[in-house]
Amino acid sequence: MATKIYTKTGDRGYTALVGGEKILKSDLQIDAYGSVDELNAHTGMLRDLVQFDEDLVAFLKKIQNQLFVVGANLAISTNKEIKMALPKLSDEHILALENEIDRLTLELEPLKNFTIPGGHVAISQAHICRVVCRRAERLVVAFNNLHDNLFDIYLRYLNRLSDYFYTLTRFLSKQLKAEESIWEH
C-alpha cells in the first residue's frame, strides 16, 4: 500500500521540521520556507510560459532545484541536531545568477525609469516571481536575525534572485517585443 499523503498532525496547526521538531504552522520559519516554496511554484509557471527559449527554460529549472535546497535548509530544526545531510548552496550559485543577470543586461537599454508590470503574461509572471522572492527574502532576513546569521547564504541568494527576475522582466519585454510600461509620476 502506498504511503498516505495526509498525516492529520496539521489538523491542530502544527507541522514537523527536518529533524522532527513540531512547530506551529504560523511560525516565522514556516512563513520563510513556505514563501520559498510559493516562489518555486511561480517559477514553474514562468518556465511553462517561456518554452520558446530553451536556455531560459533550463536556467529556470536550475533555479527551481536551488529553491528546493533553500527551502529544505530553512526547514531544518534549529533546536535539534539532525543526522541527515542536506545539499547546500554556495557562492558559485550566486555567481551564476550574477553572470546570467550580466548576460541579459548586455541586450538591454540602460534603465532610466521604474517599469510597471505587464505587457505579456510571461512578463507579468516574472514580476510575480520578483515580488514573491522579495517577500521570501524579507522573511528570511527576520528568521536569519533570530539565528545568528546561520542562513546568510540563502539570504544573499534570494537577494540576487530577485534582481535576476527583474532583469528577466526587461529581457522578456525585449524578446517578446512588448513595450515596457514606464512609471509616470
Image: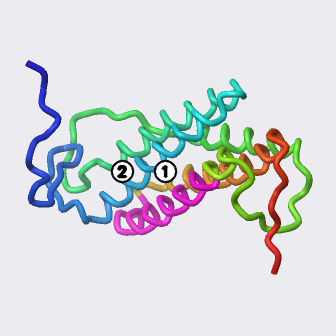
**Other residues around mark 2 within 10 Å, as few (<14) / some (14–19) / many (≥20):** many
Do the residues under discs 1 and 2 have CB atoms within 8 angstroms? yes
Q: Is residue 129 magenta?
A: yes
Q: Is residue 107 left or right of residue 14?
A: right
Q: Is residue 102 left or right of residue 8?
A: right
Residue receiving disc 1: 154
Number of callouts in the render? 2
**Other residues around mark 1 within 10 Å, as few (<14) / some (14–19) / many (≥20):** many
Q: Which residues are magenta?
A: 127-149
Residue receiving disc 2: 74
Q: What amino acid type is highlighted by mark number 2?
A: Leu
Q: Position of residue 46 (x, y in %)?
A: 59, 40
- Nearest the viewer among 182 and 75 is 182
Q: Position of residue 50 (x, y in %)?
A: 66, 34
Report the residue at 84% width, 68% height from top.
113
State the SS at label 2.
helix
Q: Is residue 78 magenta?
A: no
